[in-house]
Amino acid sequence: MEAVLRLAEDDMDLGAEVCARIEGLTYSYPNTSRPALRGIDLTVARGEILGLMGPTGAGKSSLCLTFNGLVPQLHGGRMSGRVTVAGLDAVTRPTAELAVRAGMVLEDPESQITSTTLEAEVAFALENACVAPAEIRRRVDAALAAVDLGGLQKKHPANLSGGQKQRLAIAAALALEPDLMVLDEPTSQLDPQAAAEVYAILARENRERGLTVVIASHAAEEMAETCHRIVVLDEGGIALQGPPAQVLSRVAELEALAVRPPDIARSLSRLAPRRSAPTPASRFPNRRRAPCPKARPR
Ligand SMILES: Nc1ncnc2c1ncn2[C@@H]1O[C@H](COP(=O)(O)OP(=O)(O)OP(=O)(O)O)[C@@H](O)[C@H]1O
Ligand SMILES: [Mg+2]
């Protein structure tokens, strides 16, 4: 879609503290001619839940990977523009340093789990970051409790359900106490109940601890309820952005972009325009109205 429809003039609250900033970002993977991301300007406020939506290939995953520097540092390719996370230049700072600032959760929980107990899994990145042992114990217990896996420290991750595995991956990211949590389609492999639990945890961590979240997803209903702002990407650029109620009610534009709007928005948009509801008098034109008592002649 050529025209960029900007629903909110300011893409963040003017008084808000900046968590991450992307300026004039254009990026192409190696050996490709079309940019995966083009002309992105985006600011993520501290304490915000920012939702990324868009059709397949729109650039959601690529954008997610810029926050921890894996695009372009791991993937290579050509990039122009700037990305900063918690004041760090995500294009040049070591990815190990960025991984602590921008915790990442991917679509497939299996691919992220390497340890034989839940506590070892959550402790792994903390040990790599040279956090003191007592602090590691405190953070592991707090992170597992935050994702409703408290008391399962010694359990083997293989014995968890898919939803529990994804919550474990979230705990491992939370334990780093990151400035920003980036989740790329974290619920696409989960059943609706497990997906709802993931969104509830993110909303609670945001509400109670001010966690800043960037989440890419196709789950329109959950995104509408959880996010403060939605950015819709198309062909690597920002096509729509604004509060969920505004963006997700633009059913025709979303459908033109192959983005599924929430079912309720689609139903409402399909209601035929109607005249105002008929009054009792117009419904029963032959019924004589009793005169108003005040108007009755004495
Ligand atoms: N490693 C890669 N090498 C080359 N091109 C890539 C690579 N990863 C993604 N792309 C291309 O970059 C563009 C953006 O892809 P990206 O995966 O970021 O989209 P997406 O919005 O996450 O899509 P999906 O909804 O399918 O996950 C697409 O054209 C895709 O083919
Ligand atoms: Mg993707």
Image: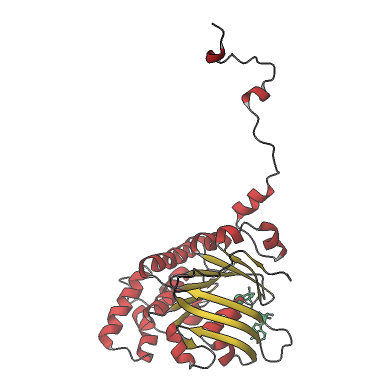
Decide which of 135, 154 is in the foreground and name it: 135
Q: Is residue 221 left or right of residue 166?
A: right
Residue 28 locus on image (x, y percent) = 67, 87
Q: Position of residue 131 (x, y in %)?
A: 32, 88
- Colour scheme of this structure image? secondary structure
Residue at the spot x=70%, y=58% of the render? 252
Left-right relation of 237 to 16: right
Q: Is residue 49 visible?
A: yes
Q: Is residue 207 left or right of residue 110?
A: left
Can you name the residue that lies furthest to the left here? Answer: 134
| The C terminus sits in image quarter | top right
**112 vs 233, nearest the viewer:** 233
Residue sitting nearer the eye, 163 or 98: 98
Q: Is residue 107 visible?
A: no
- Total marks shown come to 0
Left or right, 132 with reference to 41? left
- Residue 173: where, in percent of width, then height? 42, 79
Quick check: 68 above or below 291? below
Q: Residue furthest front?
A: 298
| Image quadrant containing the N terminus | bottom right
Q: Residue at x 66, y 36 (%)?
A: 276
**Quadrant of the picture in which ligand 2 is shown:** bottom right
Task: Name which residue lies at 64% across and 49% down.
Answer: 267
Q: Position of residue 185 (x, y in %)?
A: 55, 72
